[in-house]
Image (cartoon, grey):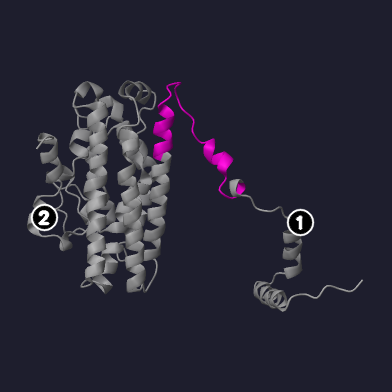
Amino acid sequence: MSEKKIDEKILHQLTKLEEKYEVMGQDLSSYLDGLLYSDYLTYWDYIHLDTLLSLQSPRTAIPDEKIFILYHQVTELYFRLILNEMEQIVFTDPIGEKTFIKRLKRINRYLDHLIDSFDVMTDGMDQDQFLAFRMALLPASGFQSAQYRKLEIFSTDFKNLVNAEKRDELAEEKDISKLYEFLYWKAGATELATGKKTLTLKQFEAKYGKEFIDLGTRLASCNILRKYKEHYHDNEDIIREMKKLDQKANVDWPLQHLKSATRYLQRDPDVIKASGGTNWQKYLPPRRQRIIFYPELWTIEEMKEWGQKFKRALENPHA
């Protein structure tokens, strides 16, 4: 029997593979043996589908709790997509103009999907079911999303995330660990009666506090705002995408949470405990947070009006 002739293209690829593994001091033949005996890859194995679908573990028998879990898991996956783009912006040096714009557009597209998807929470659960199963989840809260806090740290200088009441006082502070003590979201997890930190906040800080400080320190000179200032401060296309990111992350997204909280928790202090003790009436409205990633890109009037449009819409729903 005559030997089958090996395609020249395959021989060329084998030669390149051999060179690649030689550089690493590895034997190509061993890797080919592994390829010979390995199974074909399937879709369900590649994305770990069975594992993914097993990660919903309701604490109650209330049916709508599974919706709540699934939606928050989907949200965290979108945050991971956003952070993937942000990492490639801040850790690529130099980053080209087209690449910067492309990645900002991807981030904004992901945020659009998140904002549009929030009806799953607003309209997709029975109020009585939510308030019943939510009590079984305390003190856990969506407030404890570390990925979203990282999204903020990647986006802007740490000082822009400080509580509005302390922002002027700490405007010249460079120590990230000192600024960390006054981040705006901490005010949203204090007990209404005493002003003390809730268990929700204590848990969150214990797990992620050092990580946030370290990340803020690492990104102090290369976050998205810094990249813009260093390279593209006069690029209108980049400015447009950064303003969209600012609006979506700091107005549109929190407003979706506010609508949901208003619907499910109303404004009754008796049900504030359903949010893990977080002071959501003061924490969620953008007009109170006044978090703006890129204040340099907005007019004074625009910043004064930050989040006000939605407030008026709530007060005059039929206007």
What's the residue at 25%, 68% (across, down)?
237
Q: Secondary structure at mark 2?
A: helix
* Residues at marks 2 and 1, CA–CA distance in whole angstroms: 63 Å
What's the mark number on residue 37?
1
Q: Nearer the viewer, residue 206 or 231?
A: 231
Q: Residue 238 placed where, x, y %?
A: 26, 67
Q: Which residue is mark 2?
A: 302
Judged left or right of residue 314, residue 82 is right
Judged left or right of residue 312, residue 92 is right
Identify whether 246 is placed above or below 77.
below
* N-terminal label among 2 and 1: 1
The three-letter code of the residue at mark 2 reads Glu
Could you tell me which quadrant the N terminus lies in? bottom right
Q: Any magenta on residue 49?
A: yes
Decide if residue 202 is in sight here.
Answer: no
Q: Secondary structure at mark 1?
A: helix
What's the residue at 40%, 49% (across, down)?
78
Residue 131 placement: quadrant: top left
